[in-house]
Image (cartoon, grey):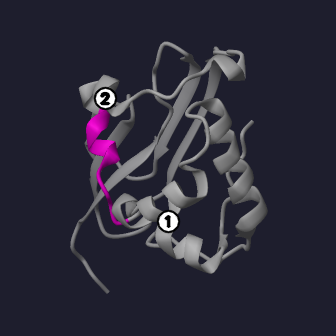
Amino acid sequence: MNDAPADFIFNVQAARTRQQHIVEESLGITQPVPLQEFTDPASSGRFLRLRAMPGPLTVRYQATLDVTHQVDEPGTIPETWIANLPGYVLPFLYPSRYCESDVLNAFAMQQFGGLWQGYGRAQAICDWVQSQVAFVSGSSCGTTSATQTLQQRRGCAVISPT
């Protein structure tokens, strides 16, 4: 049995954005430990860091939100050229261990590169995933990559356009 403290970073709290207002929220932690909170200025994601003592630790979070949806006519939604993207989103275009965009690019261009750039292409990608990737509970985990999901044609989540 390990008697050493353990460090945790949680990303369970709702983001505070222009489109999402937190009406009510509660955070419960069963150990009386100091909490450090951080909000990512680019994504508005909220992170909670703590050092837990040995023994059980339970974290409970609940929130009620008011969400303002932006609804546009699908045919009027264009793609944004890379040159016009805001700088803070550029790191998300790099390949990662979860989405090897450099490996997937050839497939994506072959499958969808000839489609008009805009909402229609994004919808075609969603439709393809829904028809070609099966939802199989337990078939993937936290280390499963997009490339592995594509190769196996199964995963634990299916993209929904709603």
Q: Amino acid at mark 2?
A: Ala
Q: Residue 18 location in percent, x, y?
A: 49, 13
The residue at which mark 1 appears reads as 146
Q: Earlier in the sequence, mark 1 or mark 2?
A: 2
Q: Amino acid at mark 1?
A: Ala
Nearer the observer, 140 or 46: 140
Whether residue 99 is visible to the viewer of this picture, yes or no, is yes
Q: Is residue 44 left or right of residue 109?
A: left
Nearer the observer, 114 or 49: 114
Q: Which mark is residue 91?
A: none
Q: Quadrant of residue 3?
A: bottom left
Single out the mark in the foreground, 1 or 2: 1
Residue under the image location 32 percent in, 86 percent down = 1
Please state the extent of the stretch shown in magenta in the rendering.
Answer: 89-97
Q: Quadrant of the C terminus?
A: top right
Q: Residue 140 location in percent, x, y?
A: 58, 74
The residue at which mark 2 appears reads as 42
Q: Residue 108 location in percent, x, y?
A: 52, 57
Q: Quadrant of residue 139?
A: bottom right
Residue under the image location 44 percent in, 66 percent down = 56
Q: Is residue 65 left or right of residue 86?
A: right
Residue furthest right in the image: 131
Residue furthest front in the image: 114
Calculate the distance from the C-alpha at mark 1 to the C-alpha at mark 2.
23 Å
Q: Is residue 29 left or right of residue 131?
A: left
